[in-house]
Amino acid sequence: MDLMRSKKAVIFATILSPVLGLAVWLVTGYVQLQNAESAWNSANYRSASESYARAARIFFWRDDLMERAGLAAAAHGDFTTAIDQFERASELSEQGWATLGYSYLSLGAMTPALDAYKRGLQIHDSYALYNGLAHIHGQQMDWQAERDALENVVRLKPDDARAHFRLGLLLSFLEPGKALPELNFASSLDSELIPAFETMRAALTATAANESQRLVLIGRGLGLLQEWNLALAAFERAVEADAENAQAWAWLGEAKQQTGKDGRVELDRALSLDHTSASVRALRGLYWNREGRYPQMLAEYLLAAEFEPENPAWQASIGDAHVNLGDLVSALSAYQRAVELAPSESTYWRLLAVFCAENGVHIEDIGLPAAEKAVELAPQDPMALDALGLSYFSSGRFANAEQTLMEAIKLAPRYFPAHIHLAMNHLAQGNTAAAFNELTYVRDADKNGPNGLLAERLLARYFS
């Protein structure tokens, strides 16, 4: 009887053991899944990713768990792990494909990112995926491909103002006749785009002698918006349309410099085509300025002023060149000449005021009155107000300086020079905490930009 019972117990245990093992295995899976959900809800994305991955290995028939692990890893910023988990998933949702592409992009892997967006689009007609595709094509300067992607972006999300505007910028040189409606519609969706729209409208509607000159005007408009890669494309098309257009070559050289290339060959070509062009000479002056070759810079602007003696811009640039050469007397004369040529333009009064303030010359009798005139002519111009604030600071009127600089910042919160000047004004009054806050803001908001680097140097000087 005991033997029979023992045999039955062995048989029962043999049958029950796998069942119990399976039960334990499943319970472990459910615990991991519960841990993952809890970690996700508490924004502990690293833990969530690990738990989702463990649950995915147990519940291997659940297609969504490895994707969730990837989403959590990406949310944690661990893009390498996210990519591994996404690529192991049997299928991905629209969000999964978009995050996979973004993860590759975050690691600088442009080609795999492009492939991820394209693979996702084979399954999903997705705004996010087309948006990612457009971004990559823009980085690669494949303008037609970016246009195609953006047309799908605005098809799927018609109220995306930025996408409409970017599409309009591309069309400005790809198919100019279609650009204005896109740009206009974008500005109607987002009022912040109105100034940029006005700039491009002026460029697109300006009278031009031929197609090449029209493209030069469009490229200059793009340059004013700091869209120098697009401007470069416009100038390249201008040269293709007319290889004898000196201005097109000169502006192509400028665009190349703005995009990290040299541009000297194009500027020399422009000079060979028209050595009496003021604009060609002026663009060459910019080149020599960037190279730190100030005698050549001065020579170019003197010639530009000779060819166009009534243009105040050349006089102001002559002033800049004299400052770089240390000849403040000649610089002052040039800035004053610019004001004489354009007495109703705030810009040249402002430049005269800034010159006096920055160099500590004739602040009371020339600089401060010039700054006041600049503000009188353009009371809502933050640059004019900044020049007046700087003039007050340079003359020791710290309370007036603070008030005026704050007005400039109120009009243009991201006009960084006003923040820097306000910081210097705070330092002059011993308010180091306020100065530190202003400089830290500029350093972080304009990271690696000229104002950000200046703020960083000032922080090192005064707070290290």
Image: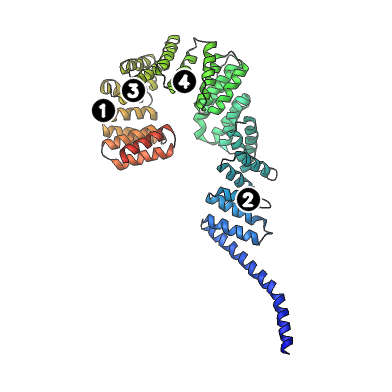
Q: x, y (%) of residue 411? A: 40, 34
- Viewer-nearest residue: 6 or 418: 6
Cα distance, mark 2 to mark 1? 63 Å
| Type of the residue with mark 2 | Phe
Of tags 3 and 2, which is closer to the observer? 2
Quarter of the image where one finds residue 398? top left
> Is there CB contact under 8 Å for labels 3 and 4?
no
Which residue has dot 1 on it? 395
Cα distance, mark 3 to mark 4? 22 Å
Q: Is residue 1 left or right of residue 464?
A: right
Cα distance, mark 3 to mark 2? 58 Å
Which residue has dot 4 on it? 287
Point 36% across, 21% down: residue: 324
Cα distance, mark 1 to mark 4? 34 Å
> Is there CB contact under 8 Å for labels 2 and 1?
no
| Type of the residue with mark 1 | Ser
Which residue has dot 3 on it? 355
Whether residue 194 is visible here, answered yes or no, is yes
Quarter of the image where one finds residue 167? top right
Of tags 2 and 1, which is closer to the observer? 2
Q: Is residue 52 left or right of residue 198?
A: right
Of tags 3 and 4, which is closer to the observer? 4
Q: Earlier in the sequence, mark 3 or mark 4?
A: 4
Q: Is residue 222 above or below residue 15?
A: above
